[in-house]
Amino acid sequence: LGGRAVTLNNQAFDTLWYVGYSDDTTERWPYFNLKGSESIGSPEWSDKPQNWFQYTFTFVTMLSNFVPLSLYVSVEMITVMMMIYISWDKHMYHEDTDTPASARSTIVTDLGLVEYIFSDKTGTLTCNVMEFKRCSVDGHVFGLPIAKSKVDEGADDATRQQLADSVHPLQNLLSGSASAAPLPTVTEADEGDEESQDGIDAFRGKLSFNAEMFLRVMSICHTVVVEKEHVGSTGKDNDDESSITSNTSSNSKKKQSKTATKRKKKKDGAPQGFAYQAESPDEGALVAAASNEYGFQLMGRTSAGVELSCRCPSLLENHTITEGIRGGLLTAKNLAAEGASPDKVSKYSCADAKSVYDEASPRRETWQILAVNKFDSNRKRMSVLVRSPPELGSIPMLLCKGADSSMLIEGVCEGADAVEGAIEKANSEDGEPGSADDCELNALLGIQAHLGEFASEGLRTLVLGVRMLTEESTNKWLEEFKSASTSIEKRDDKLTQVALDIERNLHIVGATAIEDRLQDGVPETIANLERAGIKLWVLTGDKRETAIEIGYSTKVFTPKMHLTEVVDGPAEKVKTLVAMELMRHIKIGNLPEYQLLALNETKGFNVFSAKSFVNIIAMLGNMLSERWLVWRKLYLSKIKRVWLSKKKYADQLDLLNEKIAGQKRKADPRVQRRKVRQLAREIIKDFWNDPKNSQLHNDNESLVSDDPPAIFERAKSARESLRKRRGQEDPGAESALRELAMAKVTTSTDVLDVEALSMKSYRPSQQTTNFDRKKRTVWEKLFAVDSDVRHGRLGKHLKNEYKDALALDEREQTGRHQVESMIGTAEPTHANMGHFDVSSVKRGLVVEGAALKHLLGDPILEEMLFAVASCCESVIACRVSPIQKALLLKMVRKYVAPTPTTLAIGDGANDVGMIQEAHIGIGISGLEGQQAVNASDFAIAQFRFLEPLLLIHGRWNFMRMSKAVLFFFYKNAALVGSIIVFSSRSLHSGNPLYDSWIIAVFNFVGASLPVVFMAIFDRDLPREYILQNPEVYKSGPCNEYLSVRMTLRWAFITIIQVLVIYHFSAPALQLGGGATSAFKGLMGNFDREVGDGEGGDMKVFGTTIYSQLIFVVTMKALYETKSLIHGEFPTFTCRRGKGEGWPHRLGYTWIGVSWFSIIFYIWFLYMYMLIGRRGVGTFFSFIYVTPHVLNMRSITWMVSILVPTIACILDVAGKLYSNLYYPTQSQIHAEIAAKEGTQKNPA
């Protein structure tokens, strides 16, 4: 514009004398030709126009209104209301805990863009209310099974019968050794029967060594604190006790005392008047079960140690046993073998115990706590060093509990090497039957089998162990522990090391299984989120089997989904598994960008190709971005590091290096993909050439089978091994042992998939399609917003042969098989196997944290893992640490282009890293504190509330804000556009069309409040329809509302309306026919002064055009609103029962359009004129402009009717054409919803 102004002024310089331009500085005014005017001197002529800089900065000042100053304030107002709506939503209010949803951040619009959800399991998908359900001790399972979400179809009748025979009620654990008769079952009807109770008491008090130590670990190895109960009263219990009369018989007293004891049992197992406070629900569940089920009640903590109330005699009361343990003659292995052997009478029993079992008078014990090794994410276990009471021998022992992956390993578990040896030598006859080694091996195999069974039921498992210590080793270790605990430097590392030193050679006494029920609505929520196009990754610390079972119960996995399991093992086997899966996906066409055709493609440039032009622009942009990042790195390393701390400098340097690597990868991703493919082939080749794997070449199993793999193979093989050792020969036991050895990596990790390397079933990336791209029109390519329309994937674009198949199906229903085979939905039968699309099979990925350590950290291996994960609908990462959770989320953000919007949801402190790494963090206010909520952007009480938060609020918020932003830029662009059009009539001199104060008020009167109301209340689809059709959420991630083509549509209509407003108004205002008095003269046939209302200066001319601009943008705000708020009449009433009050009865749409836009604008014109007349200045250019424009000129009202009508008709016609021929997905759903609403409410 500055250059154009200079050119035009130079061309017309000789004719611009009226503005003071002339080459002859002595020339007089041309119209001063009268006699006697010689005395008037020459004016001060300008011999040259303004330069380019002057004109440029003049236009910069004039066009500064293109940036909407009201946008920031309006967006803040809209955002605040969106946040309030989230907290007001009654559908996200949890009544049980009185917890509403809370928006803690302003990123409410990002909720409508989520593509990936990373979720914790415990407390997020589950209730985090733990309940002790089952346990495994001495090779037996105690507790009834839990119904599975996925039936184990692979289990035979013998296996099911064996499991059924080994299941006992929970309290049968108190019956002693495995050979003892089980406790009689007590029903609710018999609970008060004296004879039944006495029968149970006769069997109690015969605990085996493993059973007693199992209960000791449950009741002592924890950090539970006993506190006074401040809520409620115990008066009722006292009344119950006082109701027992004294004139009853002794048997009756005993019965009433037991009944009172039963009645006084609390859910948490705490003594009356007290409550347990546990750091985690798991600990609380174990302590409660030890108290309620088995009578080992925690009474409190004192300076002397942990005080217990026990209802059973202890083996440690036997002096022979305690002396044998202290002298090293008896070990935990020997005692366990004596107690568990079915064909021997134990030499060591509680027959010599001084105490006798009496439930009414339990025994008090005080166990001294010598040291506590707290749980950490690396060890995955906790332990306490205790000393038994003097009456139990004062024996130092270590009580430990932890995950099976950290307990049943060599070095920690005492018999782990024996288990591995038995697996490798399945036919070995070593070991005397009934020996200690044999019993320990049987027990460990039994625990392994039972752990798989527990995990298949979705239960959380823990393994419990003990270690008997000598006084010398105890004192030596305590000195090391004291030194580590008082260390200043690397205190945590030293404490971990001393914990590892003592947590060795543990004797495993049993395993626990705790149920954590799913929250209400979790499966339905996950299914709807999947329909919405959102991928879900579940990151949990549970074991693999538990995670898979939870995956099935929550519908993260479906029974027909193919599962790929990447579990712990040697690094080369884990890498080979991922490499084979990558090559398989490349071969079947799931990763066409990794196929050689795509990697070797040469991108030529055609100057006449729009795509080539876009590629050139993108290449230049990437080059500039990379240079800018390199300069920032240089500035950081040479200058900025002077005042930065070492930590901040290292963090910023790592961040810049990551951005530079990402920019290089973005410039040409084929370079990195070539490296990934090459490394995958090298890994597979090295594995193939390894002599240790030569025997695997002829295996019949295949890693790439499309059948869902059998899970829990390790537990199944353990059951078979145990059955064989007990004499129950089974032909498949030997092969099962071999499967157990391989199950340490995966069900088929050691199986080299030759098919994955062959080209027999290779599918090129150019797969056949049912659409003919030639049927697309030019308008569809350029004008359509929806990607399906633009890329020709509508019914009219179908190939003719496919249309014929559809027509045949409609006429005779005989083409169904042909249609299904063409679109790849038919089930793969022998008849149509050749047509089945292998790539259409839904897939899931299960990866263990121990396997991730071999992959994370290497960019090529990370991309290889992500390429496999990107082909899966759902991913579950189990046994992952908090750091690995954050790294997995970071990996997705790193390798997905364009970077997707990620959401992380969790409830505990271990989820904080994941929540902070994601774009959107959601904390669940559960039972693990407020750490996750404090670090999050949004807080909800239940996982099911994520569905309305994303599908309803997220979608509406993004749609509303998108329209608001586009509208604010549209109306300011219209204002600036009219100024630019007028400047062409003034030689681009910079002369303003509008008054400066009128321009300043445009950001308020120019439909600002109507747009704000639209962004607050607008709904394109009703809530019920969105929840029934979650697919409509895809419009957000697809950027339907802010796409380039949508923005170009707004820009195009802005240009059209600006031209209409100016060119339809200016000629009418320049002519004199309509410039007459509006309410006098021609319209009223009154006498008037000559010239009244006929003329008009720049203020009148500009204000009239400005009025048309106000009317047009206000009308556009009205018809851009999808849901008009009409309000209710009467708005203000004193009658009761008339709605929710006047704020809820206002017609906000019409109030915004009328009062806060048009009426306010007219009021402002009058007030501006009146204030100017009485202002401090001596001259006011807007004097009488408002009456002249609105009161005295009929042309103003003629133009005000015609111009806005024409401008809006053109806009509406374009929208009508677009919706008829090139509709978006949202528009189609809006029409369906409107039709359904009409059918439901025909009136």
Image: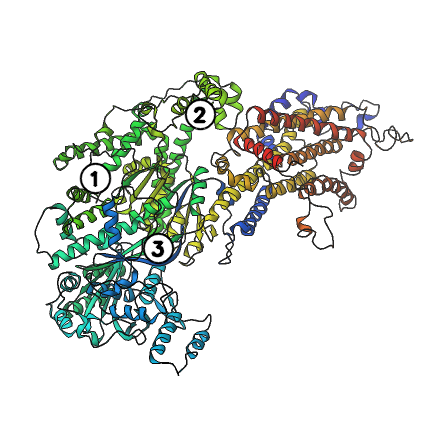
- Closer to the chain start, of discs 2 and 1, is 1
Q: Which is more toward the observer, 15 or 1151? A: 1151
Q: Tell me which corner region of the image, top left, top right, bottom left or bottom right, holds residue 358.
A: bottom left
Q: Which mark is residue 1218?
A: none
Q: Name the amino acid, label 2.
A: Val
**Circle count:** 3
Q: Which mark is residue 515?
A: 3
Q: Secondary structure at mark 1?
A: helix
| In this view, 1128 is above or below 300 | above
Q: Name the amino acid, label 1.
A: Lys
Q: Which mark is residue 614?
A: 2
Q: Residue furthest bottom?
A: 247
Describe residue 956's horizontal placement relative to residue 341 as left or right. right
Q: Which is more toward the observer, 49 or 144? A: 144
Describe residue 412's horizontal placement relative to residue 871 as left or right. left
| Residue at 34% from the left image edge and 64% from the top image edge | 288
**CA neighbours of label 1 inside 10 A, class few (<14), some (14 to 19), many (20+):** many
Front label number (3 vs 2): 3
Q: Tell me which corner region of the image, top left, top right, bottom left or bottom right, holds residue 234.
A: bottom left
Q: Label 1: which residue?
A: 573
- Closer to the chain start, of discs 1 and 3, is 3
Residue 61 shows in this picture:
no
| Residue at 13% from the left image edge and 35% from the top image edge | 695
Where does residue 364 sit, x and y in percent of width and height? 28, 75
Q: Secondary structure at mark 2?
A: helix
Q: Which is more toward the observer, 6 or 816? A: 816
Where does residue 907 sit, x and y in percent of width and height? 41, 53
| In this view, 967 is above or below 319 | above
